[in-house]
Image (cartoon, rainbow, N blue to C red):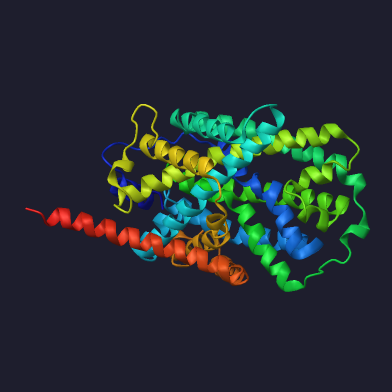
Amino acid sequence: MRNHSQKIMSSSSHSAGRLRRDLGLVGAVGIGLGAVMGAGIFVVTGVAAGVAGPAFLVGLAVAGVAAAFNGLSSAQLAANFPQSGGTYEYGRRLIHPLAGFAAGWMFLAGKLAAAGTVAIGFGHYASAMVPGASPVPMAVAAVVLLTLANLFGVKRAGALNLAIVLLTLGALGCFVAGGWTQVDGANFRPFAPHGWHAVAESCALLFFAYTGYARLATLGEEVREPARNIPRAIVLTLILSFVVYLSVGMVAAGAVGADALAASRAPLETAAATFGKPWIARFLAAGAATAMLGVLLSQILGISRMMLAMARNGDLPRFLDRIDETRSVPSRAIVLTGAIAATLAIAGKLEAVIAAAAFTILIYYALTNLAAIRLADSQRLYPQWIAWAGLLACIAMAVSLQPRTILAGTGLLAVGFAFRFRAHRLASGRKDDP
């Protein structure tokens, strides 16, 4: 498998240079947790509670199992194809170039919109803690600073991310410890007031909250011993995320009830306000702000590596495939990612694109599982049924979404194919010119 991976690397790397393997297991787990512990736990918890009532906890558990299947598929693919691009590369090599493009485009569309939204979220949290500050300048400042951090190399970005993750986990740990005694069984009744179809819809929403671990696959060229460390990092990220999410969800729902969570734009802070310990609410607000920074940092990492991979194959403009030889980073892709994220943060009003994010990520992981199904027996780390289970879970969650969400996601995909067709046609025309 190692020789196979080396051949892939040598055949796909651009002459401008390669990325360095500077991330170890701890740094990789930190990147994974930094990508997961963000808007999902601090925002989507309330949305899912509004959809399914207290039974969103079942959705949280089922989504965690589905994420585990998908994560194991990602892990064995990353072990076999340790280079930037994640499912974009797996789809191209194991399914069809169009399947790879669909995965890459959906990743970029969903994550760029999410980056703008996360920056806006940080701006609001930060402005609340800094009197007189305006959310938009704070959001843009965060994007600029984290873009610069990415330009200094993945090792330094990983160290910064790890510090951010530890602060976030500390805040969530205090929330669980401080609120456990406030849990009231009456807040879990009725358990599924909107029926079990609503629980299925909450699964799809909450699955989106787990999916930051995909960032690890897109960083395949920068993790040391990828065949060993990427699978371990993905599994550890999912286990830790599951434990934290379920603990926080149970305390939040048990303390104030699903209706109160659904009615709040900051559901965890709403719950913490009832604990009788104001410092917990303040610490949680700071943890939410650092979580947004962690997600934004990892998004810039992942998006820029996806741009690099797609540019190498002509699915994005070729100028994006250049790697800075001094710091071993795709500097042009990083700067473009930061510029788009900052522009989206200034513009705001991203609801139409964000509505499609759950669908786009399910398409991405459906293709991940399909690629894992097509692995040769000698390349497998896990039984084939795991990839089949992940694929069926993605399809089931996708069809449970609202029709307008599915249409929005399909529209994004159609725009991507139109872009690719036009770009390849122009490139072909230039080659034909005398």
Q: Quadrant of residue 395?
A: bottom right
Q: Is residue 237 visible?
A: yes
Q: Is residue 328 above or below residue 226?
A: above
Residue 312 x, y percent position in the rendering: 31, 48
Residue 189 x, y percent position in the rendering: 89, 64
Q: Is residue 321 left or right of residue 404?
A: left
Q: Residue at x 76, y 48 (%)?
A: 267
Residue 434 x, y percent position in the rendering: 6, 53
Q: Is residue 147 above or below residue 180?
A: above
Foreground pick, 46 / 12: 46
Foreground pick, 216 / 47: 47
Q: Residue at x 59, y 43 (%)?
A: 118
Q: Is residue 281 left or right of residue 294?
A: right
Q: Residue at x 79, y 63 (%)?
A: 53
Q: Is residue 231 visible?
A: no
Q: Residue at x 54, y 66 (%)?
A: 387
Foreground pick, 51 / 351: 351
Residue 41 x, y percent position in the rendering: 70, 48
